[in-house]
Amino acid sequence: MKTLLLVAHDAGGALLLAHWARSIIERCDAQHNIQFKFALSGPAVAIFTELFADLFNRIFDGSQNAPDSEPLAAQALQKEVLQKDALWQDADPSKWQRLDAVITGTGWQTQFEQRHIAVAKRMGITCAAYLDHWANYRQRFAADHDCSNSVGECTPLQLPNEIWVGDTFARRCAQQAFINERPRIRLIKNRYLVDLKKQVGDFKHQNRCENQLRDSKKTNITSLICLEPIRQPDVDYQALYQPMVSFLAQQHLASACRLAGEGNVILRLHPSMAPCGLEQLQAALTQQAIPFHISHRPLANDLAMADTVFGYQSSVLVYAMALGLPVYSFFPAHKMEPILPHSDIHYLSRVS
């Protein structure tokens, strides 16, 4: 039996790892037994808890029970059997030596995964990191997540033995980003996207059935805005959102849906719940008489309702594109080049 430790903090990496592990568990048989252990922190705790809720009733957030400098462990899962585990400690190599591999996310501006990569490499354990985005690759493995020195280099890099990517765009970006280091780069099917497409299809079917029962048809255009914290000092959210609000107003979305009641703009907060200029956006939409509401539903439900999707540089933009939805970014592309490599993203600063 192989034992794998999954490590995640940010939502993006947690979603990819959790759905990948879930697909293995569902396909597992007596000849391919795999035991998963988990080291989780931040938004990853809720994501794994929800996805594996039918397999175990709660997950342990080690980040609340151990020093920040130590690698942490959560409950162990072997098929449907729940096994509690103690905290992973640097000083106890025997626990690490029982692992066959460590697979991490690549959190942005957190060193949670990097600490586990460092220990795994020191213990001689094969380590892989699953990239969940398409930008800032070197920064994700830099000790301080910064490339602002005089030569624009990130040092030192804490690279795993393997880097996993979910599509060919990410593979090209990784090959270019690590052209000197040349780590092994593997294309691993994005199971989260597979599951998301199915969930969106199910919600669309459910919505059509409900509309038929009410003998009503969807006549309004629904826009989904996915918010995220902008990790830049002194960011002016009002100025950042203004092109998007003006675009929505010009499309006459408000007048088309004033009678809809629920509102035609869906606001979706970031999983981290970090400040993202929500109050400024609400004020701007209200000033333009654009109806809106804040969603607490699953992302798949919101995507099933949406006709267009807006975001900054979120991975949701790419997933929405895969679903065939028009995608707009309020990233200030007039000041710098788009950092996402996808040509089908419309940048509002360039839309006349």
Image (tube, rainbow, N blue to C red):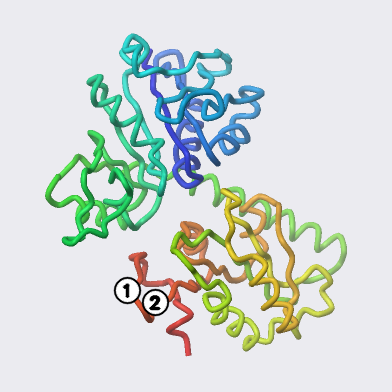
Q: Position of residue 254 (x, y in %)?
A: 73, 82
Q: Nearer the viewer, residue 291 or 221?
A: 291
Residue 72 in the figure: left or right of residue 175 = right
Q: Nearer the viewer, residue 236 or 292?
A: 236
Query: In the rendered structure, which amino acid carries the disc numbered 1?
Result: Glu
Which residue is the site of mark 2? 333
Give the residue at x 54% y 59%: 228
Which residue is the site of mark 1? 337
Residue 179 in the figure: left or right of residue 217 = left
Q: Quadrant of the N terminus?
A: top left
Determine whether the residue tagged by mark 2 lies in a helix, strand or loop.
loop
Residue 99 in the figure: left or right of residue 230 = left
Residue 53 in the figure: left or right of residue 113 = right
Q: Nearer the viewer, residue 146 or 58?
A: 146
Query: In the rendered structure, which amino acid carries the disc numbered 2?
Result: Ala
Determine contact: label 1, label 2, CB under 8 Å: yes
Q: Position of residue 340 (x, y in %)?
A: 36, 64
Q: Quadrant of residue 47?
A: top right
Give the residue at x 12% y 49%: 180
Q: Position of residue 273 (x, y in %)?
A: 61, 51
Q: Position of residue 298 (x, y in %)?
A: 66, 50
Q: CA distance from mark 1 to mark 2?
A: 6 Å
Determine whether the residue tagged by mark 1 lies in a helix, strand or loop.
loop
Q: Quadrant of residue 350?
A: bottom left
